[in-house]
Amino acid sequence: MSISVCWFRKDLRLNDNPAWNSACSDGDVIPVFVLEPSMLESASQRKKDVMFSNLMALKAELESLGGYLQVIEGPARQALPDLLTKWGSTSLHFNNDHSPTAKSRDDRIDETLNIDVVRHWGNLIQPPGAVVSGTGAVHKVFTPYFKRWVSVDTPNYQAYPTPRFCPQPQGSSTLPPVVEPPAFPTGSAGAHERLVTFLNGIEDYEDTRDFPSVQGTSLLSSDLHFGTIGPREILALVDQKTDSSTAFIRQLAWRDWYAHLMNASPEILNSPANPVYNNIEWRNNTEEFDLWVQGKTGYPIVDAGMRELKETGFMHNRVRMITGSFLVKHLLIDWRWGEQYFRHTLIDGDTSQNVGNWQWVAGTGFDAAPYFRIFNPIRQSEKFDKEGIYIRKWVPELASLSSKQIHSPWEINKKSPELTSVCLGEDYPFPIVEHSFARERCLETYKRARSEGT
């Protein structure tokens, strides 16, 4: 009898899951999830709560089919080989993870086992190597990558066959309890519910996606991170004939691109993609970093974003760019500090996406924002939260200010302190740094690094 093990990781779904499909086709199946200590230690409690909720939903779906989810505790490279031998398994199926640590782990497990190891690319629309330049390398600029990406046929995975489950082995661990249930439905059912809601209003996506006070984005980033829905299924359901749908599809392509870049160049996890920026003289002031984390920089749009992140584990994409730029270019704090904090705290904190976005905003990445592009947090606030709705929600001490005052409360305090109900320095902090000064300091620092790096 053939016994196939399906190792679930960041693919907590049954539909559009090539590893589950092949495992079900290969023999009697044992579905497995490994609770690795390193995974639990590196995530915030809120992020773990979302993962555990998604796992419970997957477990319930498997049980509805007459099966189960075998939960194993411990490092996978140690626990899996012993158990596969004990179970008499003939094959192991899983979807690849492109992050460097996961790739190294998977390769070691693959080399250790004396059974068939069947690996798939189930969490990207296009697998690495499918979208390359004329030289066969990954495009280092997004626009030509995207043009090629849209021209490549998308792999289509059929619905999985009816699984035949092995009797459940002894020793399955219990999933950890959810400390604080997520404020949204989880599992594949929750992901599909969000997708349907988004598709019903996708015609407004291009016009609303940059405004944090408007529900203009898909809210699928966490689902894609944990794999409760597959990106190919999303793409198949999007009407690709409108400008808004094209704008959304570009975001899916960015996701693939960042994954392809990290798969090809794993060193970008910890090093600038552009080596000319290896010698940036970061200030790395720990007190200022903590003020940024706490949302007490004195810049309302920055503080609103950081407080939203701390409170919910989520932050609007436009505000991620603003807060990231502020940390790196206003405070001259190493982008890797921000990247690690975001990856730990965001419920959708994905390694390649997070690193790609932080290197973009820092100007150190492939096809990144130029080093001299320094977001003005006041102008960004006035443009994307004109009425201050988002700021008032997350920085309530400024709620009494007018829509004109709320973006830079220190200005009205400086000119006419009697006209404001907010006492700066007590109710709300003064700006941690003056924008023009920070801009010039950043430009000088980056220019110096560029001259030393060439």
Image (cartoon, rainbow, N blue to C red):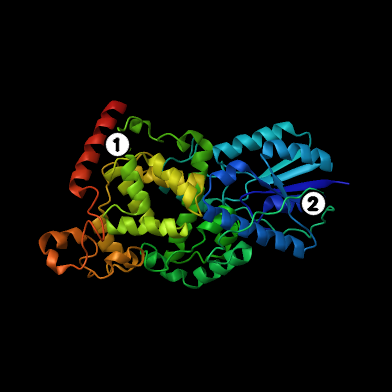
Front one among 98 and 51: 51
Instruction: Give the numbered dot on residue 225.
Output: none
Front one among 1 and 439: 439
Query: Callout 2, which amino acid?
Result: Val
Look at 18% across and 58% down and name the residue there: 410
Spatial separation of the CA atoms under disc 2 and disc 1: 54 Å
Query: Callout 1, which amino acid?
Result: Arg
Which residue in the rendered view is the most extreme toward the left? 415
Q: Callout 2: 10 Å neighbours few (<14), some, many (20+)? A: many
Please say if 147 is above or below 408: above
Instruction: Give the numbered dot on residue 283.
Output: 1
Say if mark 2 contacts mark 1, CB within 8 Å.
Answer: no
| x and y, in percent, of residue 452 in the image | 28, 26
Q: Quadrant of residue 98?
A: top right
| x and y, in percent, of residue 101 in the image | 57, 37
Give the quarter of the figure containing the C terminus: top left
Disc 2 on helix, strand or loop? strand
Q: Report whether 93 appears left or right of 96.
A: right
Give the number of the mark in front: 2 or 1: 1
| Residue hosting label 2 | 29
| x and y, in percent, of residue 52 in the image | 62, 56
Front one among 123 and 75: 75
Look at 50% across and 45% down and name the residue there: 351
